[in-house]
Image (cartoon, grey):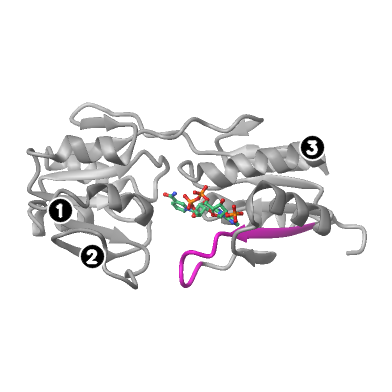
Amino acid sequence: MADARRLLILGGTGEARTVAESAAQMPGLAVTTSLAGRTRAPTAPEGELRSGGFGGANGLAGWLRHDATDAMIDATHPFAAEISRNAADACAALGVPRLVLCRPPWRAQEGDRWIEADTPAEAADALAGNARRVFLSIGSGAIEAFSHLADIQFLVRMVDAPETPLPLNDYSVVTGRGPFETAAETQLLRDHRIDHVVSRNSGGEATYAKIEAARTLALPVVMLRRPPPVAGETVETVDAALNWLNELT
Ligand code: NAP
């Protein structure tokens, strides 16, 4: 493999794992996936795995140089804006070809009762005075924004149980990792007598069941809009990312 071309996949999503699976079969290509290292037992991707932050755009550029990376696919979550920005800067500085793989957002359809918000703080404002029992499924970093809503009971879904108490007055935690089923999600919302769902507009199928469940129960969904997309060549599907890779190698 001395002359293998080197691909870095920025991961943390199902799409990143699927790209790694196929890319690892391509002859003459050495594949490394990078994870932030936040989840306790991540599903191991095909190829090499590295874990933990790089130390900003400069740290990432240093890593790319040291690894002699030939190409990058940024397949991080649509809400992971910081790493995508760093990836754009680092690749631009070194002239490393970079592709963004980003699934399309969900679109509201008939029966959906979405209240769209641009920030977690705006989402919290939408709940204040209206909600009593809320299903919060937005990633641990955004929970703080709901801490002042002392009279709301929260059901918080997380991949791993938190190691320290959450900054909420009244809450319980349910752990789980997608894909989720609509019937089970509907039951969960019913069992906990949820009256509002808060979600990120993640797109994709793995976590869409809660949106379908909310529609079934005619519940309002406070939907966080995505941060602005990072600049650069972008595709929406794993197949398109693999085509890009084929043309490059
Ligand atoms: P973020 O805000 O964009 O990233 C914060 C910092 O975490 C980055 O500056 C970087 O640290 C490090 N980091 C993030 N992704 C990394 C990766 N793939 N490899 C190495 N370091 C990484 O991202 P986030 O929203 O915290 O998400 C963290 C990871 O979880 C992402 O990889 C994402 O794909 C995955 N994920 C996120 C969500 C979500 O809802 N946001 C959902 C599912 C999965 P340094 O600056 O030190 O390099």
User: Is residue 97 visible in this depiction of the protein?
Assistant: no
Of 143 and 41, nearer the camera is: 143
Q: Position of residue 181 (x, y in %)?
A: 29, 54
The amino acid type found where label 2 is placed reads Val
At mark 3, the secondary structure is helix
Quadrant for the C terminus, please.
top right
Residue 30 quadrant:
bottom right
Q: Is ligand 1 within 8 Å of the beta carbon of the residue shown at mark 3?
A: no
The amino acid type found where label 1 is placed reads Leu
Q: Position of residue 15 (x, y in %)?
A: 54, 49
Q: Which residues are magenta?
A: 30-42
* Separation of marks 3 and 2 at Cα, in angstroms: 45 Å
Q: Which mark is residue 247?
A: 3
Q: Position of residue 102 (x, y in %)?
A: 53, 38
Q: Which residue is mark 2?
A: 173
Q: Is residue 42 left or right of residue 203?
A: right
At mark 2, the secondary structure is strand
Q: Is residue 136 left or right of residue 139?
A: left
Q: Which mark is residue 189?
A: 1
- In this view, the mark in front (3 or 2): 2
Mark 3 or 1 closer to N-term? 1
Question: Which residue is rendered at x = 23% and y = 65% of the image?
Answer: 173
